[in-house]
Image (spheres, rainbow, N blue to C red):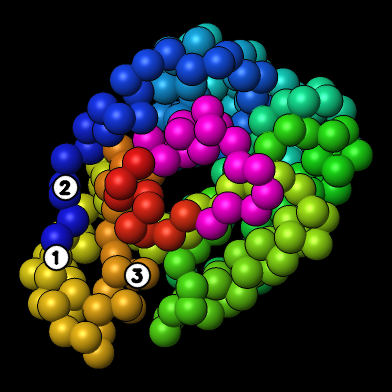
């Protein structure tokens, strides 16, 4: 069963880590603002790539860097060698009706980030993908899988996180499914899918992202729902 508390894991934030230089794309979004707040609190030097009209939404303590996350040139100009790049750009409230937007925003933005990361020699790329395989949201899953393939082909040091649905303010409706998930996890025939496509809280998601920043992968690391919950 999913723990519904949005509190951050004590294990992830028990000690102060080495301070890192972090560039976040998508830093004004649902996950991005919360992550930036935690990273700044933890002593990291955070820059957020943002459009001019969104500068006021950047959390206090982070540096706003004007740019376009859909442009490799723009992302590269905001990056410095040795940075950690956290890629959070994506279509808000994904649905099957937004397939064209997934191609235009989600795919183009990760293409830009990967190209810029290679050019600038980033230390670590953190990418939020989606749980897969999955029986629904095929267009969204396909685009995120393409993003993962780009990262692998570029041979970047990277951490890929694969949540399915992130519970939080305004996004609690799937809580009604928790009993069904619990039953599915008990049955051998459905256990694997129930765990892979499980629910995580916004607190668990932000904790996992912060931990990924503070503990970089040595190669390519993939964190599924069980690992995100445990962060």
Residue 116 falls within the magenta-colored stretch: no
Q: Mark 1 sits on what residue?
A: 178
Q: Mark 3 sits on what residue?
A: 197
Would you say the residues marked 1 and 2 are in contact, meaning their CB atoms lie under 8 Å apart? yes
Residue 200 in the image: x percent, y percent?
Answer: 30, 53
In the foreground, 16 or 99: 16
Q: Mark 2 sits on what residue?
A: 4
Instruction: Give the SS element for disc 1.
Output: helix
Q: CA distance from mark 1 to mark 2?
A: 10 Å
What residue is rendered at 47% in x and 55% in y? Answer: 223
Q: Mark 1 or mark 3, which has the lower sequence index? A: 1
What residue is rendered at 64% in x and 25% in y? Answer: 22
Image quarter of the N terminus: bottom left
What residue is rendered at 43% in x and 59% in y? Answer: 224
Would you say the residues marked 2 and 3 are in contact, meaning their CB atoms lie under 8 Å apart? no
Q: Is 177 drawn above or below residue 156 in the view shown?
A: below
Residue 53 in the image: x percent, y percent?
Answer: 64, 27
Q: Is 63 drawn above or below residue 169 in the view shown?
A: above
Residue 21 visible? The answer is yes
Q: CA distance from mark 1 to mark 3?
A: 12 Å
Magenta stretch bounds = 206-222
Relative to residue 192, is residue 127 drawn left or right? right
Residue 202 visible? The answer is no
């Amino acid at each position: 069963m999913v723990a519904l508390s949005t509190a951050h894991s004590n294990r992830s934030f028990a000690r102060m880590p080495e301070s890192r230089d972090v560039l976040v794309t998508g830093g004004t979004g649902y996950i991005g603002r919360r992550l930036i707040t935690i990273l700044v609190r933890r002593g990291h030097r955070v820059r957020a790539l943002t459009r001019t009209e969104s500068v006021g939404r950047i959390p206090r303590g982070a540096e706003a860097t004007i740019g376009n996350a859909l442009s490799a040139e723009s992302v590269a100009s905001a990056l410095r060698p040795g940075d950690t790049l956290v890629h959070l750009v994506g279509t808000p409230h994904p649905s099957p009706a937004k397939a064209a937007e997934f191609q235009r925003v989600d795919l183009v933005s990760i293409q830009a980030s990967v190209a810029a990361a290679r050019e600038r020699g980033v230390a670590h790329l953190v990418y939020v993908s989606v749980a897969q395989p999955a029986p629904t949201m095929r267009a969204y899953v396909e685009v995120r899988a393409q993003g993962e393939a780009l990262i692998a082909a570029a041979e970047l040091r990277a951490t890929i996180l694969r949540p399915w649905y992130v519970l939080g303010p305004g996004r609690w409706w799937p809580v009604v499914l928790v009993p069904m998930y619990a039953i599915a996890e008990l049955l051998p025939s459905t256990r694997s899918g129930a765990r892979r496509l499980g629910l995580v809280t916004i607190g668990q998601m932000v904790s996992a992202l912060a931990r990924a920043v503070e503990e970089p992968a040595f190669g390519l690391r993939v964190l599924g729902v069980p690992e995100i919950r445990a962060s």
